């Protein structure tokens, strides 16, 4: 899971899953924006995974987005200065 997230955040995962593909020349602006947003989310997730202790990490690996991870951490450690 961690390696997959790292590869996804570095934009290498499609090469693992699908091989080399070329984006269609008629991709809409909305598609490009959505893809860029998802990529940024994966990059942030990777940074979070690298900085969180392994014992805590196991409890948040099921979260889908960085917002989900962040909100879960805030709830768990509300009021803590850690």
Image (spheres, grey):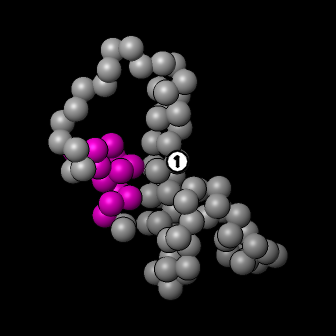
Q: Nearer the viewer, residue 7 or 54?
A: 7
Q: Quadrant of residue 19?
A: top left
Quadrant (top left/top right/bottom left/bottom right) for the N terminus: bottom left
At 31% from the left edge and 25% from the top edge, which residue is drawn?
Answer: 23
Res. 52 visible in picture = no
Of all residues, the one furthest to the left in this rendering is 19
Q: Which residues are magenta?
A: 3-15
Question: What is the secondary structure assignment of the residue under circle 1?
Answer: helix
Quadrant (top left/top right/bottom left/bottom right) for the C terminus: bottom right
Of all residues, the one furthest to the top in this rendering is 26
Please give left or right for residue 15 compared with residue 38 in the image. left
Of all residues, the one furthest to the bottom in this rendering is 55
Please give left or right for residue 76 compared with residue 19 in the image. right
Q: Is residue 68 above or below residue 57?
A: above
For residue 5: magenta? yes
For residue 43: magenta? no
* Secondary structure predominantly adopted by residues drawn in magenta: helix
* Residue 14 image offset from top left, x and y in percent: 28, 44
Q: Which residue is mark 1?
A: 41
Q: Is residue 37 above or below residue 3?
A: above
At 65% from the left edge and 56% from the top edge, which residue is drawn?
Answer: 67
Q: Residues within 10 Å of mark 1 (few under 14, many from 20)?
A: some
* Residue 52 image offset from top left, x and y in percent: 52, 72
Report the number of discs.
1
Please give left or right for residue 14 compared with residue 32 in the image. left
Q: Is residue 1 above or below residue 65?
A: below
At 48% from the left edge and 34% from the top edge, which residue is drawn?
Answer: 36
């Amino acid at each position: 899971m961690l390696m997959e997230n790292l590869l996804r955040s570095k934009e290498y995962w499609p090469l693992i899953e699908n091989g080399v593909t070329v984006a269609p020349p008629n991709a809409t602006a909305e598609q490009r924006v959505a893809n860029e947003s998802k990529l940024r989310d994966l990059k942030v997730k990777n940074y979070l995974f690298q900085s969180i202790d392994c014992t805590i990490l196991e409890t948040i690996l099921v979260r889908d987005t960085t917002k989900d991870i962040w909100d879960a951490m805030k709830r768990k450690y509300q009021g803590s200065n850690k």
